[in-house]
Amino acid sequence: MSIVLTPFARGRLFPKQPRANTIQDCSAEEFERHLNTQAPLKVLDGYAPFCKLQVHRNWTTTRCLTVPITADNRHLLRSAYEARNPAELPVLVRWFEGVQAPVARYLIAILYSREQLAKEGEKIKADWGVVGCLYTAEPEEIPMAPITMLRNALGVEEGGSGVALDREAYRRSVAFWECNANWR
């Protein structure tokens, strides 16, 4: 199985201006090489047949993506309308400022099949393309954000995958994200 970073993931995981909440101590090329040469601890099924998640022990100092919301840090939550790229419509997002997450124990690469990426207008030569990565304390997927689930249901023309909304998965996502937030 061959894996490449998609341009979408490369820009989000390895931005030109490095950020504390992206992958640390590792170049995009080193990350891609690691995924292709090191066996994952396990492979999880994603939200659709074309999606797989490879769980790797964190070999970097990358910090967890999310922090639990508490009475002590709730005042540090911020929000704004943002787009992931210029082609997408801005959506409401929230994050912590002034909070730092612990170092993640796992990096979970989110992979889409070559066929799905072609449907979304991204041609790759590898079998799988990285579209994102979760940085977690446990070797399990954290729920996809509700807005990502909605965008996926809207279709590829709106930056999604065309997968219909799963109401139960959406409810689980809301339950998680009501109690957790990303940080910057």
Image (spheres, rainbow, N blue to C red):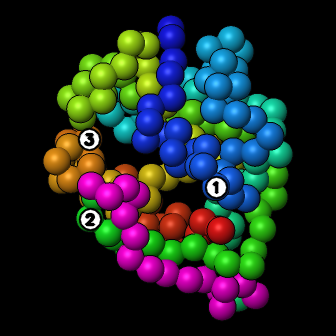
Q: Amino acid at mark 2?
A: Leu
Locate the C terminus and report the quarter of the image it occupies. bottom right
119 sits left or right of 181 in the view: left
Could you tell me which residue is drawn at 61 percent across and 36 percent down?
A: 108
Residue 3: give x, y in percent of width and height: 51, 18
Q: In this view, which residue lies farthest toward the top?
A: 1
The reply to whether discs 3 and 1 touch (Cβ–Cβ < 8 Å) is no
> Which residue range is magenta in the image?
72-87
Q: Callout 2: few (<14), some (14-19), or many (20+) C-alpha neighbours within 10 Å?
A: few
Could you tell me which residue is drawn at 64 percent across and 76 percent down?
A: 96
- The kind of secondary structure element at disc 2 is loop
Q: Amino acid at mark 1?
A: Gln
Q: Write down the residue under mark 2.
A: 89
- The answer to which of marks 3 and 1 sits earlier in the sequence is 1
Q: Write down the residue under mark 1.
A: 17
Q: CA distance from mark 3 to mark 2?
A: 15 Å
